[in-house]
Protein backbone atom coordinates (compact mmCIF):
# COMPACT_ATOMS: atom_id res chain seq x y z
CA UNK A 1 0.00 0.00 0.00
CA UNK A 2 1.31 3.42 -0.82
CA UNK A 3 -0.37 6.46 0.62
CA UNK A 4 0.48 9.76 -0.95
CA UNK A 5 0.49 12.99 0.99
CA UNK A 6 -0.97 11.62 4.18
CA UNK A 7 -2.78 14.26 6.20
CA UNK A 8 -1.74 17.11 3.89
CA UNK A 9 -2.42 16.15 0.29
CA UNK A 10 -5.97 17.33 0.26
CA UNK A 11 -8.07 18.92 2.94
CA UNK A 12 -11.78 19.15 2.34
CA UNK A 13 -13.36 22.58 2.61
CA UNK A 14 -15.37 21.10 5.41
CA UNK A 15 -12.90 21.12 8.29
CA UNK A 16 -14.45 18.06 9.88
CA UNK A 17 -12.94 15.84 7.17
CA UNK A 18 -9.34 14.97 6.54
CA UNK A 19 -8.91 13.03 3.32
CA UNK A 20 -6.07 10.69 2.56
CA UNK A 21 -5.55 9.86 -1.12
CA UNK A 22 -4.21 6.44 -1.87
CA UNK A 23 -2.93 5.01 -5.15
CA UNK A 24 -5.41 4.15 -7.85
CA UNK A 25 -5.16 0.41 -7.28
CA UNK A 26 -4.09 0.52 -3.67
CA UNK A 27 -5.76 -1.63 -1.08
CA UNK A 28 -6.01 -0.26 2.41
CA UNK A 29 -6.20 -2.50 5.45
CA UNK A 30 -9.71 -2.59 6.90
CA UNK A 31 -10.19 -0.19 9.82
CA UNK A 32 -9.56 -1.91 13.13
CA UNK A 33 -12.74 -3.57 14.35
CA UNK A 34 -11.58 -3.28 17.92
CA UNK A 35 -12.09 0.46 18.10
CA UNK A 36 -15.51 1.83 18.70
CA UNK A 37 -14.82 4.45 16.05
CA UNK A 38 -12.74 3.23 13.10
CA UNK A 39 -9.65 5.24 12.17
CA UNK A 40 -11.01 5.99 8.71
CA UNK A 41 -13.85 5.25 6.33
CA UNK A 42 -13.05 4.04 2.81
CA UNK A 43 -14.62 5.56 -0.26
CA UNK A 44 -14.00 5.62 -4.01
CA UNK A 45 -13.70 8.91 -5.88
CA UNK A 46 -13.00 9.09 -9.63
CA UNK A 47 -11.23 5.77 -9.55
CA UNK A 48 -9.16 6.74 -6.52
CA UNK A 49 -9.42 4.98 -3.23
CA UNK A 50 -10.06 7.50 -0.49
CA UNK A 51 -9.81 7.04 3.19
CA UNK A 52 -11.71 9.76 5.01
CA UNK A 53 -11.61 10.47 8.69
CA UNK A 54 -14.05 12.54 10.71
CA UNK A 55 -12.89 14.84 13.48
CA UNK A 56 -13.97 12.28 16.06
CA UNK A 57 -11.93 9.63 14.29
CA UNK A 58 -8.88 11.86 14.09
CA UNK A 59 -9.23 12.81 17.77
CA UNK A 60 -9.45 9.17 18.80
CA UNK A 61 -6.54 8.30 16.56
CA UNK A 62 -4.40 11.03 18.18
CA UNK A 63 -5.35 9.85 21.66
CA UNK A 64 -4.37 6.28 20.74
CA UNK A 65 -1.09 7.45 19.25
CA UNK A 66 -0.15 9.46 22.35
CA UNK A 67 -1.09 6.69 24.77
CA UNK A 68 0.62 4.00 22.67
CA UNK A 69 3.82 6.04 22.60
CA UNK A 70 3.78 6.52 26.37
CA UNK A 71 2.99 2.83 26.92
CA UNK A 72 5.86 1.65 24.72
CA UNK A 73 8.41 4.10 26.10
CA UNK A 74 7.10 4.36 29.63
CA UNK A 75 8.53 7.74 30.46
CA UNK A 76 8.05 10.44 27.83
CA UNK A 77 8.04 14.21 27.87
CA UNK A 78 5.75 16.37 25.73
CA UNK A 79 8.73 17.13 23.51
CA UNK A 80 9.49 13.40 23.03
CA UNK A 81 5.91 12.80 21.96
CA UNK A 82 5.89 15.84 19.70
CA UNK A 83 9.07 14.71 17.95
CA UNK A 84 7.94 11.08 17.62
CA UNK A 85 4.38 11.71 16.47
CA UNK A 86 4.75 14.97 14.60
CA UNK A 87 1.76 16.37 16.48
CA UNK A 88 1.10 19.93 17.61
CA UNK A 89 1.79 20.88 21.23
CA UNK A 90 -1.84 21.93 22.01
CA UNK A 91 -3.11 18.55 20.70
CA UNK A 92 -0.61 16.68 22.85
CA UNK A 93 -1.38 18.83 25.91
CA UNK A 94 -5.11 18.21 25.54
CA UNK A 95 -4.61 14.47 25.11
CA UNK A 96 -2.29 14.25 28.10
CA UNK A 97 -4.86 16.13 30.20
CA UNK A 98 -7.64 13.75 29.11
CA UNK A 99 -5.56 10.62 29.61
CA UNK A 100 -4.48 11.77 33.07
CA UNK A 101 -8.11 12.49 34.00
CA UNK A 102 -9.02 8.96 32.85
CA UNK A 103 -6.30 7.54 35.09
CA UNK A 104 -4.45 5.95 32.17
CA UNK A 105 -1.29 8.01 32.62
CA UNK A 106 0.38 9.70 35.56
CA UNK A 107 3.27 11.98 36.26
CA UNK A 108 6.41 10.02 37.04
CA UNK A 109 8.72 12.86 38.04
CA UNK A 110 10.75 15.15 35.83
CA UNK A 111 13.50 14.84 33.24
CA UNK A 112 16.74 16.78 33.61
CA UNK A 113 16.37 20.34 32.39
CA UNK A 114 18.01 21.29 29.13
CA UNK A 115 17.47 24.96 29.94
CA UNK A 116 14.22 26.31 31.33
CA UNK A 117 11.69 24.28 33.28
CA UNK A 118 12.28 20.58 33.88
CA UNK A 119 10.10 18.58 31.46
CA UNK A 120 7.41 16.42 33.09
CA UNK A 121 7.79 12.65 32.69
CA UNK A 122 4.51 10.99 31.65
CA UNK A 123 4.14 7.31 32.49
CA UNK A 124 1.47 4.74 31.68
CA UNK A 125 -0.38 3.93 34.90
CA UNK A 126 0.31 0.19 34.98
CA UNK A 127 -2.04 -0.25 37.96
CA UNK A 128 -5.03 1.28 36.17
CA UNK A 129 -6.29 -2.30 35.85
CA UNK A 130 -5.15 -5.68 37.17
CA UNK A 131 -5.60 -9.12 35.73
CA UNK A 132 -5.71 -12.32 37.77
CA UNK A 133 -4.15 -15.62 36.71
CA UNK A 134 -4.95 -18.88 38.50
CA UNK A 135 -3.33 -22.29 38.16
CA UNK A 136 -4.76 -25.47 39.64
CA UNK A 137 -2.57 -28.54 39.59
CA UNK A 138 -2.95 -31.95 41.19
CA UNK A 139 -1.86 -30.65 44.59
CA UNK A 140 -1.46 -26.85 44.54
CA UNK A 141 -3.16 -23.63 43.56
CA UNK A 142 -1.28 -20.49 42.51
CA UNK A 143 -2.87 -17.06 42.07
CA UNK A 144 -1.09 -14.02 40.58
CA UNK A 145 -2.16 -10.41 40.05
CA UNK A 146 -0.57 -8.92 36.93
CA UNK A 147 -0.38 -5.22 36.07
CA UNK A 148 -0.76 -3.64 32.64
CA UNK A 149 2.95 -3.99 31.93
CA UNK A 150 2.71 -7.74 32.48
CA UNK A 151 4.45 -7.69 35.85
CA UNK A 152 3.25 -9.89 38.68
CA UNK A 153 2.48 -7.52 41.56
CA UNK A 154 1.23 -10.10 44.05
CA UNK A 155 1.29 -13.89 44.28
CA UNK A 156 -0.25 -16.44 46.60
CA UNK A 157 -0.15 -20.21 46.65
CA UNK A 158 -1.65 -22.99 48.69
CA UNK A 159 -1.69 -26.75 48.90
CA UNK A 160 -5.01 -28.17 47.84
CA UNK A 161 -5.37 -31.62 46.24
CA UNK A 162 -7.33 -31.34 43.00
CA UNK A 163 -10.77 -32.88 42.98
CA UNK A 164 -13.38 -32.43 40.28
CA UNK A 165 -16.03 -31.56 42.86
CA UNK A 166 -18.13 -28.55 43.78
CA UNK A 167 -16.45 -28.43 47.20
CA UNK A 168 -13.00 -28.10 45.61
CA UNK A 169 -14.07 -25.38 43.18
CA UNK A 170 -15.82 -23.55 46.03
CA UNK A 171 -12.50 -23.47 47.91
CA UNK A 172 -10.70 -22.21 44.78
CA UNK A 173 -13.26 -19.38 44.50
CA UNK A 174 -12.81 -18.53 48.18
CA UNK A 175 -9.03 -18.50 47.79
CA UNK A 176 -9.24 -16.31 44.66
CA UNK A 177 -11.78 -13.90 46.17
CA UNK A 178 -9.70 -13.57 49.33
CA UNK A 179 -6.64 -12.83 47.18
CA UNK A 180 -8.51 -10.20 45.15
CA UNK A 181 -9.79 -8.51 48.34
CA UNK A 182 -6.22 -8.41 49.66
CA UNK A 183 -5.25 -6.25 46.67
CA UNK A 184 -7.32 -3.41 48.13
CA UNK A 185 -8.46 -2.05 44.79
CA UNK A 186 -11.96 -1.18 43.53
CA UNK A 187 -13.75 -4.11 41.93
CA UNK A 188 -13.75 -2.34 38.54
CA UNK A 189 -9.94 -2.43 38.52
CA UNK A 190 -9.98 -6.21 38.03
CA UNK A 191 -10.27 -7.08 34.34
CA UNK A 192 -10.97 -10.74 34.94
CA UNK A 193 -9.75 -14.07 36.21
CA UNK A 194 -7.99 -16.39 33.73
CA UNK A 195 -7.52 -20.02 34.75
CA UNK A 196 -4.64 -21.80 33.09
CA UNK A 197 -5.76 -25.37 32.66
CA UNK A 198 -4.15 -28.73 32.01
CA UNK A 199 -6.66 -29.61 29.33
CA UNK A 200 -8.03 -28.51 25.97
CA UNK A 201 -10.30 -25.50 26.19
CA UNK A 202 -13.33 -24.73 24.02
CA UNK A 203 -13.01 -22.00 21.39
CA UNK A 204 -14.87 -19.50 23.59
CA UNK A 205 -12.59 -20.26 26.55
CA UNK A 206 -15.58 -21.23 28.67
CA UNK A 207 -15.28 -25.01 29.07
CA UNK A 208 -12.86 -27.93 29.12
CA UNK A 209 -13.37 -30.19 26.12
CA UNK A 210 -10.57 -32.67 26.90
CA UNK A 211 -9.40 -33.04 30.48
CA UNK A 212 -7.96 -36.50 30.98
CA UNK A 213 -5.08 -35.40 33.26
CA UNK A 214 -7.23 -33.95 36.03
CA UNK A 215 -10.49 -35.62 35.00
CA UNK A 216 -12.23 -32.27 34.59
CA UNK A 217 -13.82 -32.68 31.17
CA UNK A 218 -16.98 -30.58 30.87
CA UNK A 219 -15.92 -28.09 33.57
CA UNK A 220 -17.42 -24.69 32.76
CA UNK A 221 -16.41 -21.20 33.86
CA UNK A 222 -19.93 -20.77 35.24
CA UNK A 223 -18.78 -22.95 38.17
CA UNK A 224 -16.42 -20.11 39.13
CA UNK A 225 -18.55 -17.21 37.89
CA UNK A 226 -21.18 -18.15 40.50
CA UNK A 227 -18.84 -16.91 43.23
CA UNK A 228 -16.25 -14.73 41.48
CA UNK A 229 -17.67 -11.36 40.54
CA UNK A 230 -15.41 -10.85 37.49
CA UNK A 231 -15.25 -12.27 33.95
CA UNK A 232 -13.72 -15.77 34.05
CA UNK A 233 -11.97 -17.60 31.22
CA UNK A 234 -9.91 -20.75 30.66
CA UNK A 235 -6.67 -21.03 28.70
CA UNK A 236 -4.65 -24.18 27.92
CA UNK A 237 -1.46 -24.11 30.03
CA UNK A 238 0.92 -24.45 27.04
CA UNK A 239 -0.83 -21.60 25.24
CA UNK A 240 -0.55 -19.52 28.41
CA UNK A 241 3.20 -20.17 28.58
CA UNK A 242 3.53 -19.16 24.92
CA UNK A 243 1.63 -15.92 25.69
CA UNK A 244 4.34 -15.01 28.19
CA UNK A 245 7.00 -16.00 25.67
CA UNK A 246 5.56 -13.49 23.20
CA UNK A 247 5.08 -10.82 25.81
CA UNK A 248 8.68 -11.00 26.96
CA UNK A 249 10.06 -11.18 23.41
CA UNK A 250 7.78 -9.41 20.91
CA UNK A 251 10.36 -10.08 18.18
CA UNK A 252 9.24 -13.73 17.97
CA UNK A 253 7.54 -14.13 14.60
CA UNK A 254 7.03 -17.81 13.90
CA UNK A 255 7.82 -20.49 16.44
CA UNK A 256 6.88 -23.91 17.69
CA UNK A 257 6.95 -23.92 21.48
CA UNK A 258 7.71 -27.21 23.24
CA UNK A 259 7.06 -27.29 26.98
CA UNK A 260 8.67 -30.28 28.68
CA UNK A 261 6.52 -30.28 31.81
CA UNK A 262 5.42 -33.29 33.88
CA UNK A 263 2.60 -33.39 31.31
CA UNK A 264 4.19 -31.90 28.21
CA UNK A 265 2.53 -29.60 25.70
CA UNK A 266 3.14 -27.25 22.82
CA UNK A 267 1.94 -24.06 21.19
CA UNK A 268 2.16 -22.39 17.80
CA UNK A 269 3.13 -18.77 17.19
CA UNK A 270 2.60 -17.40 13.68
CA UNK A 271 3.09 -13.78 12.61
CA UNK A 272 3.83 -12.77 16.18
CA UNK A 273 0.53 -14.08 17.54
CA UNK A 274 -0.46 -17.19 19.40
CA UNK A 275 -2.50 -19.33 16.95
CA UNK A 276 -4.68 -21.78 18.81
CA UNK A 277 -6.82 -22.75 15.82
CA UNK A 278 -10.60 -22.93 15.65
CA UNK A 279 -10.64 -26.10 17.77
CA UNK A 280 -7.93 -24.79 20.14
CA UNK A 281 -5.86 -27.90 19.41
CA UNK A 282 -2.96 -26.33 17.48
CA UNK A 283 0.35 -27.46 18.91
CA UNK A 284 -0.96 -30.37 20.97
CA UNK A 285 2.26 -32.17 20.19
CA UNK A 286 1.99 -34.30 23.32
CA UNK A 287 -0.32 -36.64 21.42
CA UNK A 288 1.78 -36.90 18.27
CA UNK A 289 2.33 -40.62 17.65
CA UNK A 290 6.06 -41.17 18.00
CA UNK A 291 6.13 -44.99 18.29
CA UNK A 292 3.44 -47.14 16.74
CA UNK A 293 1.80 -49.30 19.40
CA UNK A 294 4.31 -47.86 21.90
CA UNK A 295 4.02 -46.87 25.55
CA UNK A 296 0.51 -46.06 26.81
CA UNK A 297 -0.58 -42.41 27.03
CA UNK A 298 -3.15 -40.93 29.39
CA UNK A 299 -5.30 -40.06 26.37
CA UNK A 300 -6.01 -43.77 25.94
CA UNK A 301 -3.78 -44.29 22.90
CA UNK A 302 -0.31 -45.74 22.63
CA UNK A 303 3.02 -44.27 21.56
CA UNK A 304 2.17 -40.57 22.08
CA UNK A 305 5.06 -38.14 22.54
CA UNK A 306 4.04 -37.46 26.15
CA UNK A 307 4.98 -41.03 27.03
CA UNK A 308 8.55 -40.36 25.79
CA UNK A 309 9.32 -36.69 26.41
CA UNK A 310 7.36 -35.50 29.44
CA UNK A 311 9.32 -34.69 32.60
CA UNK A 312 7.81 -37.83 34.18
CA UNK A 313 9.88 -39.97 31.81
CA UNK A 314 13.09 -38.70 33.43
CA UNK A 315 11.99 -38.86 37.03
CA UNK A 316 9.19 -41.41 37.17
CA UNK A 317 11.10 -44.63 37.79
CA UNK A 318 13.45 -43.41 40.52
CA UNK A 319 11.16 -41.02 42.31
CA UNK A 320 13.70 -38.20 42.12
CA UNK A 321 13.33 -34.53 41.25
CA UNK A 322 14.31 -33.05 37.88
CA UNK A 323 17.18 -31.28 39.65
CA UNK A 324 18.46 -34.56 41.10
CA UNK A 325 18.17 -36.20 37.68
CA UNK A 326 20.26 -33.49 36.02
CA UNK A 327 22.83 -33.54 38.82
CA UNK A 328 23.39 -37.20 37.98
CA UNK A 329 23.56 -36.42 34.24
CA UNK A 330 26.18 -33.72 34.86
CA UNK A 331 28.15 -36.22 36.96
CA UNK A 332 28.07 -38.53 33.92
CA UNK A 333 26.31 -41.27 35.83
CA UNK A 334 25.87 -44.06 33.26
CA UNK A 335 22.15 -44.90 33.67
CA UNK A 336 21.01 -41.26 33.90
CA UNK A 337 23.15 -40.28 30.93
CA UNK A 338 21.69 -43.18 28.92
CA UNK A 339 18.09 -42.22 29.81
CA UNK A 340 18.83 -38.62 28.82
CA UNK A 341 20.34 -39.72 25.50
CA UNK A 342 17.25 -41.71 24.58
CA UNK A 343 15.11 -38.76 25.72
CA UNK A 344 17.01 -36.35 23.43
CA UNK A 345 16.73 -38.78 20.50
CA UNK A 346 12.97 -38.99 20.94
CA UNK A 347 12.66 -35.24 21.31
CA UNK A 348 14.78 -34.68 18.18
CA UNK A 349 12.55 -37.04 16.18
CA UNK A 350 9.45 -35.19 17.38
CA UNK A 351 10.95 -31.80 16.47
CA UNK A 352 11.95 -33.11 13.03
CA UNK A 353 8.36 -34.26 12.47
CA UNK A 354 6.86 -30.99 13.74
CA UNK A 355 9.05 -28.98 11.40
CA UNK A 356 7.81 -30.84 8.34
CA UNK A 357 4.49 -29.08 8.95
CA UNK A 358 5.76 -25.70 10.17
CA UNK A 359 9.34 -25.00 9.20
CA UNK A 360 10.09 -22.39 11.84
CA UNK A 361 12.06 -21.70 15.02
CA UNK A 362 11.74 -24.02 17.99
CA UNK A 363 11.50 -22.82 21.58
CA UNK A 364 12.22 -25.35 24.32
CA UNK A 365 10.85 -24.77 27.82
CA UNK A 366 9.13 -26.36 30.75
CA UNK A 367 10.60 -27.96 33.86
CA UNK A 368 13.04 -30.07 31.83
CA UNK A 369 13.89 -27.32 29.34
CA UNK A 370 15.03 -24.95 32.05
CA UNK A 371 17.83 -27.40 32.99
CA UNK A 372 19.11 -27.59 29.41
CA UNK A 373 22.57 -26.10 29.05
CA UNK A 374 23.89 -24.49 25.86
CA UNK A 375 25.65 -27.80 25.16
CA UNK A 376 22.37 -29.70 25.53
CA UNK A 377 20.68 -27.31 23.12
CA UNK A 378 23.53 -27.70 20.60
CA UNK A 379 23.40 -31.48 21.03
CA UNK A 380 19.63 -31.53 20.46
CA UNK A 381 20.00 -29.32 17.40
CA UNK A 382 22.58 -31.69 15.91
CA UNK A 383 20.29 -34.65 16.49
CA UNK A 384 17.46 -32.83 14.70
CA UNK A 385 19.73 -31.85 11.81
CA UNK A 386 20.90 -35.46 11.39
CA UNK A 387 17.28 -36.54 10.97
CA UNK A 388 16.27 -33.73 8.65
CA UNK A 389 15.26 -34.70 5.11
CA UNK A 390 16.70 -31.50 3.66
CA UNK A 391 20.46 -30.89 3.65
CA UNK A 392 20.05 -27.13 4.15
CA UNK A 393 18.34 -27.58 7.53
CA UNK A 394 18.31 -24.02 8.84
CA UNK A 395 17.12 -24.60 12.35
CA UNK A 396 16.99 -21.93 15.02
CA UNK A 397 16.40 -23.41 18.40
CA UNK A 398 16.45 -21.64 21.72
CA UNK A 399 15.37 -21.89 25.29
CA UNK A 400 12.09 -20.51 26.53
CA UNK A 401 12.03 -17.45 28.76
CA UNK A 402 11.47 -19.93 31.63
CA UNK A 403 9.89 -17.13 33.68
CA UNK A 404 8.63 -17.95 37.18
CA UNK A 405 4.96 -19.01 37.02
CA UNK A 406 5.17 -18.55 33.25
CA UNK A 407 1.81 -20.15 32.55
CA UNK A 408 -0.07 -18.29 35.33
CA UNK A 409 1.40 -15.03 34.07
CA UNK A 410 0.43 -15.91 30.49
CA UNK A 411 -3.14 -16.68 31.53
CA UNK A 412 -3.45 -13.24 33.14
CA UNK A 413 -1.86 -11.64 30.08
CA UNK A 414 -4.87 -12.59 27.95
CA UNK A 415 -6.87 -9.85 29.68
CA UNK A 416 -3.90 -7.46 29.79
CA UNK A 417 -3.29 -7.74 26.05
CA UNK A 418 -6.94 -7.11 25.19
CA UNK A 419 -7.10 -4.04 27.44
CA UNK A 420 -3.81 -2.52 26.24
CA UNK A 421 -4.68 -3.20 22.58
CA UNK A 422 -8.02 -1.48 23.08
CA UNK A 423 -6.85 1.65 24.89
CA UNK A 424 -3.85 2.07 22.59
CA UNK A 425 -5.93 1.47 19.46
CA UNK A 426 -3.81 -1.42 18.21
ZN1 LIG B 1 -1.86 -39.29 23.91
Image: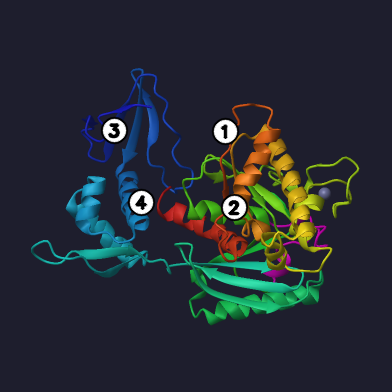
Residue 316, compared with residue 84, is above or below; it is below
Occupied quadrant, residue 254: top right
Q: Main secondary structure of the magenta part?
A: loop
User: At numbered mark 1, what does the secondary structure look like: helix, strand or loop?
Assistant: loop
**Which part of the image, by quadrant, shows the N terminus?**
top left
Q: With respect to residue 154, does 390 lie above or below?
A: above
Q: CA distance from mark 1 to mark 4?
A: 40 Å
Q: Which mark is residue 242?
A: 2
Label 4 belongs to which residue?
64
Q: Earlier in the sequence, mark 3 or mark 1?
A: 3
Q: Tell me: is circle 4 under 8 Å from ligand 1.
A: no
Q: Is residue 297 left or right of residue 148?
A: right
Image vertical order of residue 389 relative to residue 379, above or below: above
| x 78%, y 54%: residue | 339
Query: Which numbered disc covers residue 394?
Result: 1
Q: Is residue 320 visible?
A: yes
| Front disc: 4 or 2 | 2
Which residue: 33% across, 56% down? 73
* Horizontal arrangement in the rendering, residue 180 relative to residue 388 (left or right): left
Q: Are marks 2 and 1 in contact (CB under 8 Å)?
A: no
What's the CA distance linking mark 2 and mark 1?
Answer: 22 Å
Stretch in magenta: 205-226
Closer to the camera in the image, 403 or 133? 403
Question: How crowded is the residue under tag 4: few (<14 C-alpha within 10 Å), some, or many (20+)?
Answer: many
Mark 1 or mark 4: name the one nearer the start of the chain: 4
Report the mark closest to the observer, 1 or 4.
1
Amino acid sequence: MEIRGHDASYRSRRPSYVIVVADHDATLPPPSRRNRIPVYTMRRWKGFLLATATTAQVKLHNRHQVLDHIYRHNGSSKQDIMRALNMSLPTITQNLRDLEADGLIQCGGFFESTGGRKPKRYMFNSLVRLSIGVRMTSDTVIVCAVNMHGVCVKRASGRLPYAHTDAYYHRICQFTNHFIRSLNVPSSTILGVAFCMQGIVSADGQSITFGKILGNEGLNTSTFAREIDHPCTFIHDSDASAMTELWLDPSIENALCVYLEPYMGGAVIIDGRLRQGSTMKNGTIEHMTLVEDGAPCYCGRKGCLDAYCSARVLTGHRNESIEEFFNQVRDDEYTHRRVFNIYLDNLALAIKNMRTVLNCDVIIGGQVGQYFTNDDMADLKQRVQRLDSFPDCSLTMRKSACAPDQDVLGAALTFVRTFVDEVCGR
